[in-house]
Amino acid sequence: MNRIPVTRIALLAVGAVLLVTACSSKPKPVVAPESKPAAATATPVPSRTPIAKVEPKPEAPVRISVEELNRKGYLKDAFFDYDRYEIRQDQRDTLTKDAAWLRENGTVKFTVEGHCDERGTSQYNMALGERRAEAVKDYLVQLGIASSRVQIISYGKERPFVTGHDEKAWAQNRRGHFLVTAN
């Protein structure tokens, strides 16, 4: 009989063990199940650390320059009758709208300029312009605007808005004019 050496048998045995071990480590093929609802086939996702939700920072309000506020003319002038400083009934709506805008823009400070037409002396018109500016300020304060936000000045007849020597021009020059000074 032929004898197989022991070393050969040992090598064959080790080879067989390695072959069996190597074949058993192959992953088994996964067969997809037949059309089950998506919820039933969903596999649980491993829990992850939740991502912190970043809230957007509120944008700072855009500050418009004083020059731009004056150029856009958000505040409308109040006009007066000849030789008068009482707020006319038809000007109350205008000043009420001015007060609403000033409440919405609480940081705005402003000057009310009192103006007159060309008739009368310079001294008389300076005093009348001051009373007009004061009347506008008082009306706004009654509507809730802080008096600390308002300055007044009179220019009398020295700075006409409209040049001319008739009632149409004079009516435009008798006014309380707004000038924004700080925002």
Image (cartoon, helix red, strand yellow):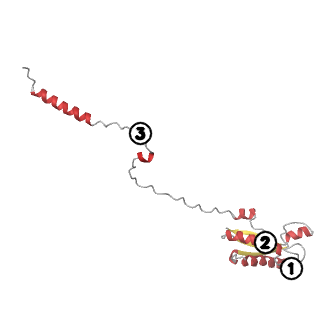
Q: Position of residue 122 (x, y in %)?
A: 86, 76
Q: Amino acid at mark 3?
A: Glu
Residue 34 - label: 3
Q: Nearer the viewer, mark 3 or mark 1?
A: 3
C-alpha separation, residue under disc 2 versus residue under disc 3: 76 Å
Pointer 2 residue = 93
Q: Amino acid at mark 1?
A: Tyr
In the rendered image, the vertical position of residue 127 relative to residue 57, given as above or below: below
For the residue labelled by badge 3, is the local secondary structure a helix, a strand or a loop? loop
Q: Residues within 10 Å of mark 2 (few under 14, many from 20)?
A: few
Q: Residue at x 19, y 31 (%)?
A: 16
In the rendered image, the vertical position of residue 18 relative to residue 68, given as above or below: above
Q: Residue furthest left?
A: 1
N-terminal of the pair, mark 3 or mark 1, is: 3
Q: Residue at x 37, y 37 (%)?
A: 31
Quadrant showing the N terminus? top left
C-alpha separation, residue under disc 3 versus residue under disc 1: 101 Å
Q: Position of residue 74 (x, y in %)?
A: 74, 65
Q: Quadrant of residue 109?
A: bottom right
Q: Residues within 10 Å of mark 3 (few under 14, many from 20)?
A: few
Q: Amino acid at mark 2?
A: Asp
Q: Position of residue 141 (x, y in %)?
A: 72, 78
N-terminal of the pair, mark 2 or mark 3, is: 3
Left or right: 86, with 35 as reference point: right
**Contact flag, marks 1 and 2 (Cβ < 8 Å):** no
Pointer 1 residue = 124
Q: Residues within 10 Å of mark 1 (few under 14, many from 20)?
A: some
